Image: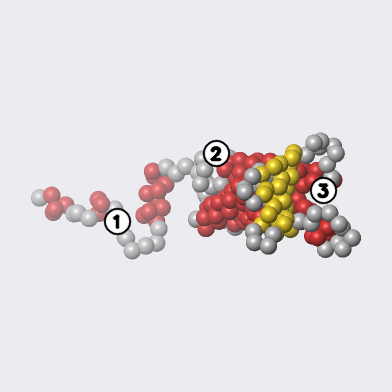
Amino acid sequence: MASTASEIIAFMVSISGWVLVSSTLPTDYWKVSTIDGTVITTATYWANLWKTCVTDSTGVSNCKDFPSMLALDGYIQACRGLMIAAVSLGFFGSIFALFGMKCTKVGGSDKAKAKIACLAGIVFILSGLCSMTGCSLYANKITTEFFDPLYMEQKYELGAALFIGWAGASLCIIGGVIFCFSISDNNKTPRMGYTYNGPTSVMSSRTKYHGGEGDFKTTNPSKQFDKNAYV
């Protein structure tokens, strides 16, 4: 029962992390910068993995998609690949988890389901590591440019998408670790052993009953009555 409960918790945590990681791809604010006036914010610059935009004080946004994938900076290409890999691994991890959980009717025996659940945990851990690496690589680029005194272009700060990605990656790793430990719980479960002693006849069972030592003492029924009992 404890193993089943831990698998359900691990599945919910892992799926929540995978959903958060998936939501970072279309999220706008991977990095953000603002230009403040004397009274209001005059412009907000923000960018993600697919485009860069500017929003003026009236709320009108002007966006520009990245023109060519091959002309992109190396860190953006790496982040794209890592985040797509994280989403893909999380999808396959959820499928393996459904087959490996004890509360489902598919997956085979308990031993086979435990191995599948451990595989799902490894896949979720890889998904979390990919997402963590992608978000950290992007954040490292932002902080390096921000604290570089020789960098004269527009400086950005960390956006909300990075924090969402870090949170989702952490949940995927935690859920994957719980899935991996579930295989050890299944190995500790005691198994009932049955021995076959061969068929026994009715006469042998009666002999064991009458010849056994116990509180019941049996006698020959023909010796319980004498001749006067029938007169």
Q: Is residue 151 left or right of residue 162?
A: right
Residue 219 image label = 1
**Residue at image coords 57%, 43%:** 98
Point out the tag, 3 or 2, that comes first from the N-terminus: 3
Q: Which colour scheme is used?
A: secondary structure
Residue 195 image point, x, y percent: 53, 49
Residue 84 image point, x, y percent: 72, 42
Residue 106 image label = 2
**Residue at image coords 74%, 45%:** 52
Quarter of image, res 211:
bottom left
Q: Is mark 1 on a helix, strand or loop?
A: loop
Pointer 3: what residue? 75
Point out the tag, 2 or 1, that comes first from the N-terminus: 2
Residue flagged by tag 2: what amino acid is it? Val
Q: Which of 57/45 is in front?
A: 57
What's the CA distance linking mark 2 and mark 1? 58 Å
Residue 153 image label = none
Point out the tag, 3 or 1, that comes first from the N-terminus: 3
**Residue at image coords 39%, 50%:** 207
Pair 3/1: label in front:
3
Residue flagged by tag 1: what amino acid is it? Thr
- Quick check: marks 2 and 1 in contact, CB under 8 Å? no
- Quick check: marks 3 and 1 in contact, CB under 8 Å? no
Q: What element carries label 2?
A: loop
Pair 2/1: label in front:
2
Residue sticking out furthest to the left: 231
| Mark 2 crowd level (few <14, some 14–19, many ≥20, 10 Å Cα) | few
Q: What element carries label 3?
A: helix
